[in-house]
């Protein structure tokens, strides 16, 4: 006997167990996504700073190149590790959607960098036109917002659950009812 009365409120362990039972798969996916993203982040950070500081490439071009390289690594990690349990619908579709949605994520990061460097930098150049400001705008603000968008969009549109209808396809049943 556990010592609990029938009908007594659920214990803390029971509540945590129930939450893990309900959201455990999401926590595992999020952990794997964060690991892949962390690896891609390091690639992005190192390549961006190498191109911008050593090669003297403009910060916006450096960010674009570093993000494309990091996104390629992230696709491979997410497809073959994070969401390997999900069925593979059409590799070309997944790849194209992944990079399209990464383009939106890239736009978020580059937009944050552009607003910081050229918008705020026009007002306070000694603060916002520095390597530190570029890194904060790009990697903390831009990557943070872009990561939230990517996790949601990859789960919803790219690596879909089995039996989920593709979002971009149209149903003939809907067309015939109209």
Image: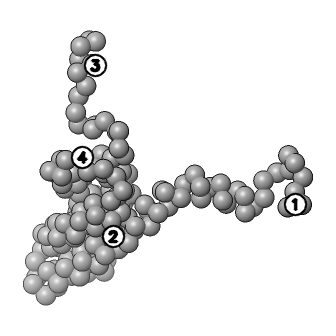
Residue 73 to residue 52: above or below: above
- How packed mark 1 is, by other alpha carbons closer than 10 Å (few <14, some 14-19, many 20 or more), is few
Q: CA distance from mark 4 to mark 1?
A: 49 Å
Residue 72: % across, % down: 19, 66
Q: Tell me the tag on residue 174.
A: 3
Q: Residue at x 22, y 69 (%)?
A: 73
Q: CA distance from mark 3 to mark 1?
A: 56 Å
Q: CA distance from mark 4 to mark 3?
A: 22 Å
Residue 87 to residue 126: above or below: above
Image marks 4 and 3: residues in contact by CB distance under 8 Å: no
Residue 10: % across, % down: 78, 53
Quarter of the image containing the N terminus? bottom right
**Count of residue discs:** 4
Q: CA distance from mark 2 to mark 1?
A: 45 Å
Mark 2 or 3 closer to N-term? 2
Image marks 2 and 1: residues in contact by CB distance under 8 Å: no
Mark 4 or 2 closer to N-term? 2
Nearer-the-camera pick, 139 or 4: 4
Which residue is labeled 4 in the image?
Answer: 89
Which residue is labeled 2 in the image?
Answer: 36
Q: Quadrant of residue 146?
A: bottom left
Report the mark closest to the observer, 4 or 2.
Answer: 4
Query: Is residue 23 at least partly visible in the picture?
Result: yes
Report the mark closest to the observer, 4 or 1.
Answer: 1
- SS of the residue at dot 4? loop
Q: CA distance from mark 4 to mark 2?
A: 21 Å
- SS of the residue at dot 2? helix
Q: Tell me the tag on residue 1.
A: 1
């Amino acid at each position: 006997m556990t010592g609990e009365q029938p009908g007594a409120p659920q214990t803390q362990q029971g509540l945590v167990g129930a939450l893990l039972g309900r959201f455990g798969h999401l926590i595992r996916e999020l952990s794997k996504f964060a690991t892949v993203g962390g690896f891609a982040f390091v690639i992005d950070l190192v390549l961006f700073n190498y191109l911008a500081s050593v090669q003297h490439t403009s910060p916006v071009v450096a960010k674009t190149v570093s993000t494309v390289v990091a996104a390629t690594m992230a696709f491979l990690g997410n497809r073959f590790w994070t969401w390997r349990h999900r069925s593979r619908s059409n590799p070309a579709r997944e790849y194209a959607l992944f990079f399209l949605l990464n383009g939106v994520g890239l736009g978020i990061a580059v937009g944050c960098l552009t607003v910081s460097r050229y918008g705020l930098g026009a007002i306070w150049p000694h603060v916002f036109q520095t390597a530190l400001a570029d890194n904060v705008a790009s990697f903390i603000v831009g990557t943070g917002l872009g990561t939230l968008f990517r996790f949601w969009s990859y789960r919803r549109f790219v690596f879909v659950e089995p039996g989920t209808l593709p979002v971009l396809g149209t149903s003939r049943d809907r067309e015939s009812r109209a």
